[in-house]
Structure formats: structure tokens, C-alpha cells
Amino acid sequence: MTSWLPTLITKTPEEGYELAVKMSRVAVKMTQPDAKMREKLRPVYAGDANALIASSQVVATNFATVAAANDYWRGKS
């Protein structure tokens, strides 16, 4: 079985951010594995500014983790 998260190492900050978003999305899927329920709830939080801010905070936390794992891309381009 192939891991969906084999490493936190990325070439660029942009790739790191994309990984942070993916980590956040996978967390939602693991927390609520029922796709129909996620689809039902999406319109509720899509119009809720507080829920969207909370989602951004989760992505930011995951990005901080990825950035630290990549030594903040120092000396990398």
C-alpha cells in the first residue's frame, strides 16, 4: 500500500502550501468519512465566514509544519 503522505519535503514553498491544503482536506475526509454528509454540510460552512477562517487556520498550521520540515526553504530555490 502506498502512503498518501510519504514525505513532508517539497521543492518550493508553493508545493509546500499545496501539500498543506491536501493535508487539511485529508483530515476532513478522515474526520467525516461519509462523502454524502460532507456534501450536505459544504453549503453550510461555505457561507459561514467563521468556518472559512477556521479552515484557513488549519491550512496555516499545516503549512507551518511543512515549512519547518523543509527548513523554511533556506538555500533552496
Image (cartoon, helix red, strand yellow):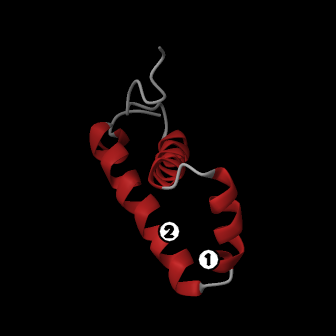
Tell me whether the residue at label 1 lies in contact with that at label 2, contact meaning CB atoms closer than 8 angstroms: yes
Q: Is residue 18 left or right of residue 9?
A: right
Question: Which residue appears at 37% of the width and 33% of the height?
Answer: 8
Question: Which residue appears at 50% of the width and 78% of the height?
Answer: 53
Q: Quadrant of residue 47?
A: bottom right
Q: Amino acid at mark 2?
A: Ser
Question: Which residue appears at 60% of the width and 51% of the height?
Answer: 34
Residue 71 in the image: x percent, y percent?
A: 28, 39
Q: Which sits in the foreground, 77 or 30?
A: 30
Query: How many residues crowd around disc 1 within 10 Å: few (fewer than 14), some, or many (20 or more)?
Result: few
Q: Is residue 8 left or right of residue 2?
A: left
Q: Where does label 1 land, which residue? A: 45
Q: Nearest to the eye among marks 1 and 2: give it.
A: 1
Q: Where does label 2 land, which residue? A: 55
Looking at the image, residue 14 lies above or below residue 11: below
Mark 2 element type: helix
Q: Which sits in the foreground, 50 or 34?
A: 34
Mark 1 element type: helix
Residue 36 in the image: x percent, y percent?
A: 69, 56
Sequence-first tag of 1 and 2: 1
Q: Quadrant of residue 49?
A: bottom right
Q: Which sits in the foreground, 50 or 63?
A: 50
Question: Which residue appears at 48% of the width and 16% of the height?
Answer: 2
